[in-house]
Image (spheres, rainbow, N blue to C red):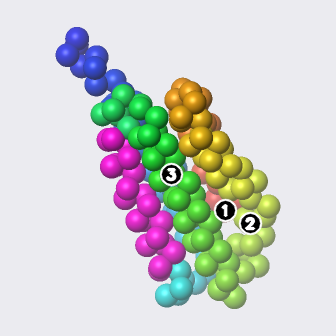
């Protein structure tokens, strides 16, 4: 067990990232089941989201292997904020389709979590250079906000 002790940062960063992937997976599933139509204009924002999420293993590994050094923690936040912005673009592209507009726009409503999450990410990125623990707490807070699938679109 003693040989595994130095690996706790890698494992902890993996767990946080796995939770994020699960959150995006579940919400993506519910979002796409809530729409009536998907067109080519949705595929590019969807691919954009996939691109940012595909960088998560790199950012996670770098953060864990460097024992939560400020720069890797900030880069992790950069990947997370870009994923959040890509998610917002995907939602907007789906709402633009006329047959989706009413039901989806109504379900999404004011989207307070979608608005506050990037702000927490920005603060957490800056905090990475001041106090890494507070930065990580910000990332965990956003994960906690989204842990339960978005009920607005769940049905």
Residue 19 among those drawn in magenta:
no
Numbered disc in front, either 3 or 2: 3
According to the picture, the residue beneath numbered tag 2 turns out to be 107
Q: Residues within 10 Å of mark 1 (few under 14, many from 20)?
A: many
> From mark 1 to mark 3, how far is it between C-alphas?
26 Å
Question: x, y percentage for residue 11?
Answer: 34, 30
Pointer 1 and pointer 2: residues touching (CB < 8 Å)?
yes
Q: Is residue 26 visible?
A: no
Circle nearer the N terminus (3, 2): 3
Q: Name the side, left or right, on which 132 lies relative to 102.
A: left
Q: Which of these two is toward me, 2 or 152?
A: 2
- Tag 2, which secondary structure? helix
The answer to which quarter of the image holds residue 16 is top left
Residue 60 in picture, x, y percent from top left: 37, 42
Whether residues under marks 3 and 2 lie with C-beta atoms below 8 angstroms apart, the answer is no
Q: Which residue is mark 3?
A: 78
Label the magenta part by its dominant secondary structure.
helix
- Residue stretch rendered in magenta on the structure: 43-62
- Mark 2 closeness class: few <14, some 14–19, many ≥20 residues within 10 Å: some
**Is 60 colored magenta in this rendering?**
yes
Query: In screen coordinates, is 119 left or right of 125?
Result: right
- The CA span between labels 1 and 2 is 6 Å
**Label 1 close to label 3 by CB (< 8 Å):** no
Q: Answer few, some or many: residues within 10 Å of disc 3's Cα (few below 14, many 20 plus, some between 14 and 19).
A: many
Which residue is identified by label 1?
153
State how far apart marks 3 and 2 are (Cα): 28 Å
- Secondary element at image label 3: helix
> Is 144 above or below relative to 43?
above
Tell me which residue sits at (28%, 17%) in the image.
Answer: 5
């Amino acid at each position: 067990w003693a040989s595994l002790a130095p690996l706790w940062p890698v494992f902890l960063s993996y767990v946080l990232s796995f939770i994020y992937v699960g959150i995006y997976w579940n919400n993506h599933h519910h979002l796409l089941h809530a729409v009536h139509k998907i067109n080519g204009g949705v595929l590019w924002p969807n691919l954009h989201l996939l691109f940012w999420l595909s960088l998560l293993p790199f950012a996670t590994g770098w953060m864990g292997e460097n024992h939560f050094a400020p720069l890797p923690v900030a880069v992790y936040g950069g990947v997370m904020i870009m994923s959040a912005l890509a998610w917002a673009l995907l939602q907007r592209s789906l709402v633009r389709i006329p047959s989706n507009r009413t039901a989806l726009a109504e379900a999404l409503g004011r989207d307070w979590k979608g608005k506050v999450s990037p702000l927490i990410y920005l603060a957490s990125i800056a905090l990475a250079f001041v106090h890494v623990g507070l930065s990580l707490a910000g990332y965990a807070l956003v994960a906690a906000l989204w842990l339960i699938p978005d009920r607005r679109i769940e049905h």
